[in-house]
Amino acid sequence: MYMSWLLQGGIGILVGLYSYLSPGIINIQVFQLSLHHAWRKVLFIIGIIAFVEIPYCMLCMSGFKWLMSIRYLQLFLSWGVFLMMFIMAIVMFYKTYTEIPKDETSVLPPKLMTIPSLLLFAILNPFQLSAWSIWGAYFVDKTWFSWTYTGIFFFSIGACIGAFLILFTYGHIGKRWMHFFTQHKKQLDYTIATLLLFLSMVQLLRNLNIVS
């Protein structure tokens, strides 16, 4: 039982790391804040942003726990997950292939957000519910995923830790990370697209009852 909870937390950490891996509004703002504010203040801000992952994750994953009890919805979600990941993989392959390489300055937002604005955006982030809904849809039919409230709680804590670690990385070595990301963006995007395509194929085989 305890090993299952630890595994759940470990999966959550990986999901949290992935959620802020690519440069976006929040992680780039954290990077810029680290250039203008004391590190203790930046750590406090990162902690708040990461903590927000817990209630969002608990809410969405608990909602999918309820959906699991409705058979036809579970079947719909299983095929929806396959289509979603397959389409995302194809779109990502196409965008990566046609994208013109950019330098570090082109991915930075032109204006530094104030700390209250950044925290408000993180707390009321409109992409949180959709992102956690996607993860919930993916895990909904996985028998190894513990859908008890304790299991979901450990998963949420793991997601919080993962988000904190990747935001800490952006704040601490943001310039080097930004340089690495822009220099290897195509390779990273192709890797993520390949992973999405692989997961969509696994989901397809599961839907056809070819693999368990």
Image: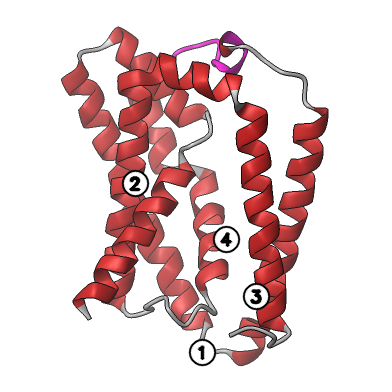
Looking at this view, is 46 or 176 the one in front? 176
Is 21 situated above or below 193?
Answer: above
Q: Are marks 4 and 2 in contact (CB under 8 Å)?
A: no
Q: Are marks 1 and 2 in contact (CB under 8 Å)?
A: no
Amino acid type, residue under disc 4 in the picture: Ile
Q: Secondary structure at mark 1?
A: loop
Q: Which residues make up the magenta segment?
A: 105-113
Q: Residue at x 20, y 13 (%)?
A: 38
Q: CA distance from mark 3 to mark 2?
A: 26 Å
Residue to which mark 1 is pinned: 69
Q: Secondary structure at mark 3?
A: helix
N-terminal label among 1 and 2 = 1
Q: CA distance from mark 1 to mark 4?
A: 18 Å
Residue to which mark 4 is pinned: 134
Q: Residue at x 44, y 22 (%)?
A: 177
* Tag nearer the camera, 3 or 2: 2
N-terminal label among 1 and 4 = 1
Local crowd at mark 4 within 10 Å, few (<14), some, or many (≥20)? Answer: some
N-terminal label among 4 and 2 = 4
106 within the magenta span: yes
Q: Is residue 113 visible?
A: no
Instruction: Give the quadrant of the N terminus.
Output: bottom left
Where residue 129 appears, as percent x and y from the top left, is 51, 55
Q: Residue at x 49, y 49 (%)?
A: 128
Q: Does 41 sit left or right of 52 as displayed?
A: left
Q: CA distance from mark 3 to mark 4?
A: 10 Å
Residue to which mark 2 is pinned: 162
Instruction: Give the quadrant of the C terminus.
Output: bottom right
Numbered label attached to residue 77: 3
